[in-house]
Image (cartoon, grey):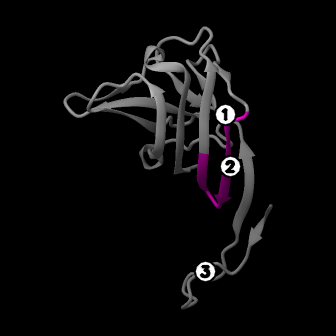
Amino acid sequence: MSGVLGGAGSKSGVIGTTELDYEEGEWSPQLSDGSNNATMNSGSTGGSYIKIGKTINLFGRCTTSSLGSVSGSVRITGLPYTIGTGQKHYSGMGIGEAGNLACSAGENPALVTQLGGTYLHVMQFDSGVGSTNLQAGVWSSDGYLIFSGIYKID
């Protein structure tokens, strides 16, 4: 579904009439190290989005069946729109569930936007150290994340 919403201005009429672009769609999350892609479990991987103006509401489940040659820091690629540039475009995503990750007690996965990119950094938050890039060795062959969040485009 897509289209333009008209008359989205203020109720007092001070702003006037604004048109907002609206679109709903699907996207395919992909775990990668930037060079190599993991094999995704197609029955448990997928996502959707809602675009209103320059705001993208993102929903997804990223589930692997094999890491293949993925090594080093991992990311989730394939976002439907390029994340904006500049400090105002930083955002994080909420993770509702994570499974089959070798995180120690007190360590939790996190997702952060890459400015000007079409991917999310997968981070590992440690209450004693802060956040670092989550490494492929922490993500098992059948690891998964269920997440949602908002990001802005230019």
For marks 3 and 1, the one nearer the N-term is 3
Report the number of numbered marks. 3
Q: Provide the residue span drawn in magenta.
A: 43-59
Q: Is residue 11 left or right of residue 135?
A: right
- Answer few, some or many: residues within 10 Å of disc 2's Cα (few below 14, many 20 plus, some between 14 and 19): some
Q: How many neighbours does mark 3 have within 10 angstroms: few (below 14), some (14-19), or many (20 or more)?
A: some
Q: Residue furthest left?
A: 128
Under mark 1, the amino acid is Gly
Q: State whether residue 118 appears in this view.
A: no
- Where is mark 3, residue-wise? 9
Residue placed under numbered mark 2 in the picture: 48
Query: Which x, y percent locates residue 108?
Result: 35, 34
Residue type at mark 3 is Gly
Is the magenta region chiefly helix, strand or loop?
A: strand
**Residue 92 vertical position relative to residue 133 in the rendered view, above or below:** below
Q: Are there few (<14), some (14-19), or many (20+) residues within 10 Å of tag 1?
A: some
Q: CA distance from mark 2 to mark 1?
A: 12 Å
Secondary structure beneath disc 1?
loop
User: Residue 101: where, in percent of width, then height?
Assistant: 44, 25
Q: Could you say which is closer to the camera, residue 20 or residue 13?
A: 20
Quadrant assignment for the N terminus: bottom right
**Closer to the N terminus: mark 2 or mark 1?**
2
The amino acid beneath tag 2 is: Ser
The answer for how far apart the CA atoms under marks 2 and 3 are is 27 Å
Q: Quadrant of residue 105?
A: top left
- Give the label on residue 78, or none: 1
Q: Residue at x 47, y 42 (%)?
A: 97
